[in-house]
Amino acid sequence: MELNIVNEVAALQRLSIRQLRQRFADLFSEATAASNRTWLIKRIAWRMQALAEGDLSQRARQRAAELARDADLRLNPPQPKATTTTPLPEPVRVPAPIDPRLPPPGTILIRPYKGQLVQVQVLTDGSAYAGRVYPSLSAVAKAITGSHTNGFLFFRNGLNHNKETA
C-alpha cells in the first residue's frame, strides 16, 4: 500500500458517519444507508486500495464465485473461543438491601408455636435460629413450620422489637 492510502485510511477514523457515507457515495457512485462505522471504513479502504492498485482479476473473481457456490452456508456465527490465560474476575457480592420492616440487628423475636417458645435473632445478613443462619424470616418460618409461610406474618407479634443485646 502506498503511504498516501495509509494516510487516507487513518483519516477515515476521524470522520463522522455522515462524512463516511458521503465518502462511500463518492467512491462507489451509489448511496448507502449503513451506519456501522467499522463496516464503512473497511469498505471505503478496500475501494481506495482497489482503485490505487487494481481490482481483482477476472480469473480471481471466477474462482471466488466457484468457491462461494461450493461452500456450505454457515447458519450460526462462530462461538467465541474461551480463553484460559486470564481468569474471570470474581463476581462482586452486593448485599441485599435491608428490609425496613425488619427490626435492627441484634433483636430477638419470640413467638410461641405448637407449645414451644421459638426465638430468632435478627442479623445484618439474615436471621439466626437453632444454630443456623437463614437468609430471611420466611426461610426461618419454613424451617419451623415445614411449609411456605410469610415470615413477617409468622413473627407479627414478635416484631414489636423485643430488643436484647446478644
Image (spheres, rainbow, N blue to C red):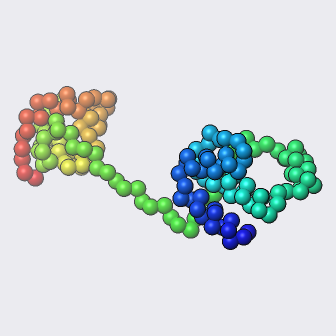
> Residue drawn at (21%, 39%), measured in percent from left and top?
99
43 in relation to 30, above or below: below
Count of labels in the image? 0
Image position, residue 70 (x, y; %)? 88, 46
> Residue drawn at (26%, 40%), measured in percent from left and top?
136
Q: Can residue 71 be seen in this snapshot?
A: yes
Judge left or right: residue 56 versus residue 143. Answer: right
Image position, residue 42 (x, y; %)? 67, 55
Image position, residue 113 (x, y; %)? 18, 30
> Residue drawn at (36%, 56%), measured in percent from left and top?
92
Q: What is the quadrant of the N terminus in the image?
A: bottom right
Furthest toward the bottom, the residue is 3
Q: Nearer the viewer, residue 9 or 139?
A: 9
Judge left or right: residue 96 versus residue 50. Answer: left
Residue 8, by quadrant, is bottom right
Q: Can residue 63 be seen in this snapshot?
A: no
Image position, residue 142 (x, y; %)? 29, 34
> Residue drawn at (20%, 31%), measured in percent from left and top?
152
Q: Nearer the viewer, residue 119 or 30?
A: 30
Q: Nearer the viewer, residue 141 or 79?
A: 79
Furthest toward the right, the residue is 59
